[in-house]
Image (cartoon, rainbow, N blue to C red):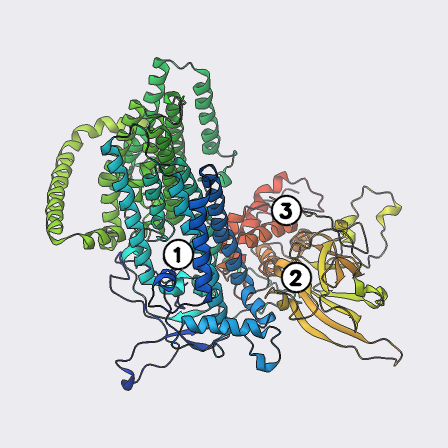
Amino acid sequence: MSTAADVSAGGAELRHRQVYDDSSDGSDSIDPGRTVPMKPLVPDAQDGDIGKPKKTFGRTPDGTVFVVPTTHDMVSQLLDPRQPKNLSDAVVLAILALHILAAYFLPAGYKRPVFAAVFLFWRASYNVGIGILLHIQSHHRRLITWAQRWKLFEHPSTGNNPRPWLYNLLKRELEAKIPEDYEFEKAPVEYNTWLVFRRVVDLILMCDFVSYCLFAIVCGHTPKDESMLIGSSRWLLGITLVGFNLWVKLDAHRVVKDFAWYWGDFFYLIDQDLTFDGVFEMAPHPMYSIGYAGYYGISMMAASYEVLFISILAHLAQFAFLVSVENPHIDKIYNPPAPREKTQTRSPVSANATVAFDLPADNTFMRSASISQKDMPAPVHNLVGLNNMDLFRVPDCVVVILPLYVAALTFATPETYMWKAIFVAHALLWRIWYHAGLGFVLDRQSKSKMWTRHFLKYGESAGEAWRQWKGMYHISMIMCNTSFIAACWKMYNLPEDWGYGLVLFKHVLGAGLIALQLWTAFSVYDSLGEFGWFCGDFFFDHEAKLTYTSIYRFLNNPERVFGTAGIWGAALITWSRAIFITALVTQILNVMVIAFVERPHMQKIYGRSMREEAGLTKFIKRSLPPPVKVLQESVDKVLDDTSHFVEEFLDSARPKFASGVKTIVRDTSALFNVAPARLTITRIAPDLAGLDPKQYSLTIEGTQTLQSAIDERATGKESFSGRFPKLIKTKTFEYGAPLRVRWRAPANHSKEDWIGLYMVTDNRLRDTTEVSSLGRWTPTCTGVYDASMANSSITVKEHVVDKADPSDPDMMEGEVVFQGDKLWWTQGVFEFRYHHDGRHTVMSISEPFEIRISKFDEEDVEVDVGTKALYAKAVESALLPIIQNCLDRDDDIAPGAVDESFGCHVERDGKYAKRIVYAIREMFGVEFAPAVVLADRSVRKLAWRICNAKEVLAPYSMSHSKGTTTPANEEMPTKI
């Protein structure tokens, strides 16, 4: 659904991919009417072409450039008599007519359940059906593969098309809809496949919309005792929402055209200049967010909770479709990870490379081996989120214990007026402290560094002041919300009749407001990170640079309104005067903190780089009539003068209260190896007769470990004879190293044979595989399976084996490679299994082999090196190859030297960090969190952490050792 231009991560948007990326100066990079320049796919037009209609050019993944014909939206194609019609249009209209006839002729008692089921079917066809098709097309190009396999677009004259009638039907249907710039025979298979796909989409979307409207009609009614004012207001608001929804859809289609409307970029890319204004400045993902406002307008006109609930369900399904299908494709196509920074001289990532280093007699390079204070790895132990919960930290213990105390008191105390008043007052006190108290601290910190100075006064560092502030802010926020929830619980009374008045509506609306606040909080945290969440720019003077991404592209201060939406939602649900007062106090305090604390600090730090108006504000101002614009400018001037007066008054009054306030401040998982295991029924293939399993064989090659496992197996706990094991012949390969498998099979073997990688203990039977390969498989022959990535594992295509003896049977052989996600990222004993004809019938099993991580030999390094700097060098040299394996030996991800940074893929996919921390734990005996890898992003910094951790833990080590397990401190005297 977009063009081929590069865009930023923050610019990725639904149904259009080239959205504006706000520059650091705070100004929008795309103004209304401004277009996005894109690299042309064809030469510039000559002078003679001026005045002709501009054509759009598309490009397929193989580089084919073609003219993209002009197409029209589905409503025009179906209902506009001026547009050409074909058989598929008649089929769609006939199905829609059947829906309408069913709504008319069905008995009244069957209409609601039938049309609810019909709508849910079409909604599932949209979100699940189309979602699956787009997912497999994005990841495996499966739709293109199917079209090529079925030979849908091959001309019958070639003799390769088994269904000429279908070819002629498709040709007639598609050419009838596109009379210009389109020839069925010459169009790329990607474009023809997309045209067929969009006809399926037309059917599903039209039936989805019509079935929803019919369901609303059969459920519509006028509530009893509804006044004329309420009824007219309900219809007026409903019609307004539907009209707004219609404008959103039309304006979005004006911007993104049919190409994005029908997910064209899942098939090909286009060269086109797009202007992003209007609805795309109002809200994120407007097609799926505000673009569904009409659902709620129709629900209001129908006055039916059934329609409202099914609308909410459909809207949630649409968001699930966005998160699981569209956003991953956006990131894959338009927001790839940035190239990894490389040094000028680097060692290649070789499969069999070993790292060696010379040790000079002196310590001339000790200074360079150490990490400077500037490059020191930063702590990565975040506070926010359940995944960061660590009960070894005091703030985390507090945010668990205190809410438990509040919950216990809430359930244990009686429901009397006094206790309700106590809980409401408790919530108000925490709310005042969170906004006013912490706001005052931030204001003093901004102007005089009060918080940091206090800790420096007692010999602490600025980092310690920052950690203590984060703890206090985190505890205050948790207790603020906990006390408010407890107060709401005390003030809430379960309705006796959910159908009375607006009781159910208030609960639904309140839950929606709570969900809006949660979404806002997640969006703000994703955009600001831990540093911005805890107001880090009040404590550290970094080189300031503002970027407006995520929700900040549309709003300057989303917390001002959306940040308190859940408070008002709770007030609606409880329908309590005390909770409404609490919500009002919260709103006022929130606005005051933003106006008098955050905004002045932002202006001081960022200055002119702050933008004055957000995307939504600019859109609204442009849409206002001229008289309203003049009035708005006058109101802005009055508000600005008033704010200046209030600021001057507070500045003059502040010294009188400063001394009193200062005294207050001064005193105060491993993955399951067998999951999900599924039993398979052994089936004997009809063509299995005549195949001799003895003629099948598998041979494994890979990077073998340099150290033997014999020494680690002899622990001293065995009998005397058991301490001298026999020579181990089982191959042992490095953790994460690619494994090459050379297979051999009879010439008449099935083309659908495949090879899978399993743990030896996974399968009890030798002739049948009992568990799924979980993606760790590869075919033996190319062009057999639909997955586009399946053929990538074949390194040597099958070929005839030369016979040593003419009497030998005809044999075929080839070679495949297992690497990356096709490997088991754990230690153990494994085997390869050769399967017959796409089934789980085993024809051959390789010899078992072991994947292991060799322990770091600290004793040898200590004896040979003897210095801390050289010990760090040894750790770096041992760590580099294993990290290269963990990063798939991909030159765009894996470093070639210890000081090179990892590729951005490591941040995108958490599997890489988990692999690395597992390898470090097994190799060095030190356990890190995956976030450490994301923070350090280099072998040198990780090696520094390992050395530092082992030095700290050395006195507590209980492992068997011949000597010291970490380098001794050279400055400390050695006791003899």
Tell me the quadrant of the picture where the N terminus can be found: bottom left
Give the distance between the C-alpha atoms of the residues marked 3 and 2, in whole angstroms.
20 Å
Identified at 37% across, 25% down, the residue is 488
Look at mark 1 in the image and give the residue it sits on. 14
| In front of the other: 200 or 724 | 200
Give the distance between the C-alpha atoms of the residues marked 2 and 1, in whole angstroms.
39 Å
SS assignment at label 2? loop
Q: Earlier in the sequence, mark 3 or mark 1?
A: 1
| In front of the other: 149 or 354 | 149
Amino acid on which disc 1 is placed: Leu
Residue 943 visible in rendering = no
Do the CB atoms of the residues marked 2 and 1 lie less than 8 Å apart? no
Left or right of 42? Residue 721 is right
Question: In the figure, residue 726 lies in which quadrant?
Answer: bottom right
Look at mark 3 in the image and give the residue it sits on. 671
Amino acid on which disc 2 is placed: Ala
| In front of the other: 975 or 54 | 54
Residue 914 drawn at (x, y percent): 57, 50
Which residue is situated farthest in the front direction here? 105
Left or right of 747? Residue 735 is left
SS assignment at label 1? loop
Q: Which mark is residue 737?
A: 2
Question: In the figure, residue 543 lies in which quadrant?
Answer: bottom left
Residue 584 visible in rendering = yes
Amino acid on which disc 3 is placed: Leu
SS assignment at label 3? loop
Do the CB atoms of the residues marked 3 and 1 lie less than 8 Å apart? no
Q: Which mark is residue 719?
A: none
